[in-house]
Amino acid sequence: MTLSTHKRIREQARKRQELLEEQKALEEQENAEESESLKDDMNLESMTVPKLKDLAEANEIDLDGATKKADIIEKIITAKTQADVDEALNEDVEDAEQSEGDTDGVDTGTA
C-alpha cells in the first residue's frame, strides 16, 4: 500500500468516528427533546381553553374550529410536531449540501 492509501484509510476511519459521535450526540439531544416535549404536553393540560387558544393564535396554529380542550391540545401538539419534523428535514438538507461541499478538492487518489 502506498502512503496516500494509508492516509485515505486513516481519514475515512476518522470521519466514521466523527459521524458515530455526532449520531450519539443527536440521539441524546432527541431524548432530551422528547422529555421536554412531554413536560410541554403536561403544561398544556394545565392551561385553560382561552390560554390554549391564545397560545395557538400566537403561534399561528389553525384550530380548525376546535373548541374542546382536548381537541385544541391535539391541534397544538400536531402543529408543533409537524414544525419539528420540517425543521429536522431542513437541517438534514443543509447538512447534506454542506457535506457535498466538503468533498470538493479532496484527493480521492484516482488520477
Image (tube, helix red, strand yellow):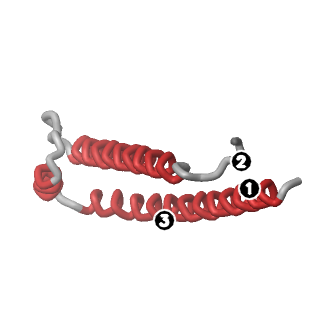
Q: Secondary structure at mark 1?
A: helix
Residue picked out by circle 1: 8
Labelled pair 1, 3 in contact (Cβ < 8 Å) = no
Mark number, residue 32: 3
Q: Is residue 23 left or right of residue 5?
A: left
From mark 2 to mark 1, how far is it between C-alphas?
8 Å
**In the picture shown, does residue 11 fall above or below 107?**
below
In this rendering, the count of numbered labels is 3
From mark 3 to mark 2, how far is it between C-alphas?
42 Å
Q: Amino acid at mark 2?
A: Gly
From mark 1 to mark 3, how far is it between C-alphas?
36 Å
Labelled pair 2, 1 in contact (Cβ < 8 Å) = yes
Q: Nearer the viewer, residue 23 or 45?
A: 23
Q: Position of residue 98 (x, y in %)?
A: 45, 51
Q: Is residue 100 left or right of residue 69?
A: right
Q: Quadrant of residue 68?
A: top left
**In the picture shown, does residue 13 fall above or below 80?**
below
